[in-house]
Image: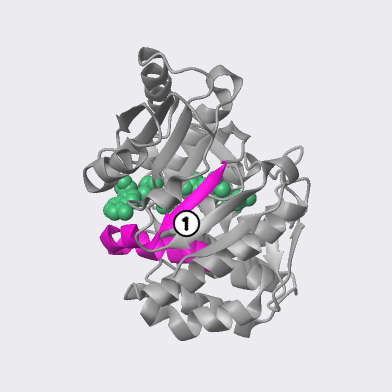
Amino acid sequence: MQQTVQIALDERSYPIVIGAGLLGSPSTWQGLPKAHAALIVTNTTVDPLYGAQLAAALAPIYPQVHRVVLPDGEAFKTWESLNLIFDALLGHGCDRKTVLFALGGGVVGDMTGFAAASYMRGVPFVQVPTTLLAQVDSSVGGKTAINHPLGKNMIGAFYQPVRVVCDLDTLKTVPERELSAGLAEVIKYGPIADMAFLDWIEANLDALRARDPQALAHAIRRSCEIKADVVGQDEREAGLRAILNFGHTFGHAIEAGMGYGAWLHGEAVGGGMVMAARLSQALGLCDEAFVQRLHGVVSRAGLPTVAPVIDAADNAGRYLALMRLDKKSEAGDIKFVLVNGQGQAQMRGAPDALVRQVIDACCVAA
Ligand code: NAD
Ligand code: GLY
């Protein structure tokens, strides 16, 4: 059964379509912007699995369907990969009506969105997320970016897709470790917005890890509903939207500190949520029972619950330095997303000494 969640952003509104068998179904692709050409952006892993299927489905709609296949991995979320997209667009003589299709996980989606935002000052693009993480988070809401060696997602733009198509069938081939990484972004929606959803996740974690289609469909729909609500209120992160970054301030430091790709984004968010919950508890915002509960669900999702040591000489200092580069920081003051254990989040700073204690308590050397 097909379900739709709407992102309400006035003239930039769009549907998120969730269901099985969507990729190859002609009706999925009806009503998209008309153009002479489409460019499918994908990577070396996803292209052999789904590239031909999507190209065949788009062939009746667009006179030309081109494909560009990027190297796979967070380490390739770079200017060099972005330029491969521009090379393909210019090489094929693509005009400003060309529609881009992001076929892949969050890395492909973020890069394709940024390419779409900037090619000829903006062309339409469609998100076709093929990982759980991308279906519940990164394909929705219009954040696009590449990494800089000094910080994650530092170069980018807010640019909304015209449609998001989540085909549940693509999740059948996602490696187990990646599925767990996606569950981190599902779990985060509970503590920040909906504790009943956290109850549901706990009760259905085994079904989710076994890829039960009904469980996955519900998790994706509810995650997208919560994200749609937040993004609809605060598209460009003037305030509220930052709560979607629960666990990400610590998580981004783990990713950068370990070198992009060593820890999956979702794994870093999993460990980061436990650290953020521990900091919330240290500040008196939530109780120990909630920290233990979150620790338990993160662990059962197959995610790390202890953070890595990223600097043998001054681990906490390195975390703090990396977190000062976070986009939420203001004049070097780190802003954390903290939770109260009752489904509400807030942004606030914390004394360095307390953050150091939390880092020391949460980290172990590999
Ligand atoms: P990813 O894009 O690297 O995909 C994970 C791996 O799975 C890759 O090797 C990929 O090739 C492979 N893969 C993708 N689909 C597959 C399939 N169906 N079958 C088999 N293999 C498949 O990682 P991700 O977890 O999807 O996304 C992480 C990225 O998303 C990070 O760069 C993160 O910063 C970004 N992100 C962005 C937002 C946002 O709002 N824009 C939100 C969260 C995360
Ligand atoms: N993933 C965080 C956001 O979209 O704001």
Q: Is residue 184 magenta?
A: yes
Task: Answer above or below: position of 216 versus 151.
Answer: below
Q: Main secondary structure of the magenta part?
A: helix
How far across and how far down the image is residue 182, in percent? 43, 61
Q: Secondary structure at mark 1?
A: helix
On the picture, is 336 further left or further right than 261? right
Start-end of magenta stretch:
162-186
Task: Answer above or below: position of 301 versus 14.
Answer: below
On the picture, is 107 further left or further right than 177? right
Say what amino acid the circle numbered 1 marks. Gln
How far across and how far down the image is residue 14, in percent? 61, 48
Q: Nearer the viewer, residue 271 or 321?
A: 271
> Quadrant of the image for the C terminus?
bottom left
Q: Is residue 142 visible?
A: yes
Q: Is residue 66 magenta?
A: no
Task: Answer above or below: position of 46 versus 178.
Answer: above
Task: Answer above or below: position of 330 versus 271.
Answer: above
> Quadrant of the image for the N terminus?
bottom left
Mark 1 sits on what residue?
135
Q: Nearer the viewer, residue 242 or 263?
A: 242
Disc 1 CB within 8 Å of nearest ligand 1 atom: no
Residue pictured at 49% horizontal, 82% vertical: 202
Q: Is residue 361 visible?
A: no
Q: Nearer the viewer, residue 355 or 225?
A: 225
Q: Categorize mark 1 by other alpha carbons within 10 Å: few (<14), some (14-19), many (20+).
A: many
Residue pictured at 60% horizontal, 67% vertical: 189
On the picture, is 77 further left or further right than 282? left
How far across and how far down the image is residue 68, in percent? 32, 29
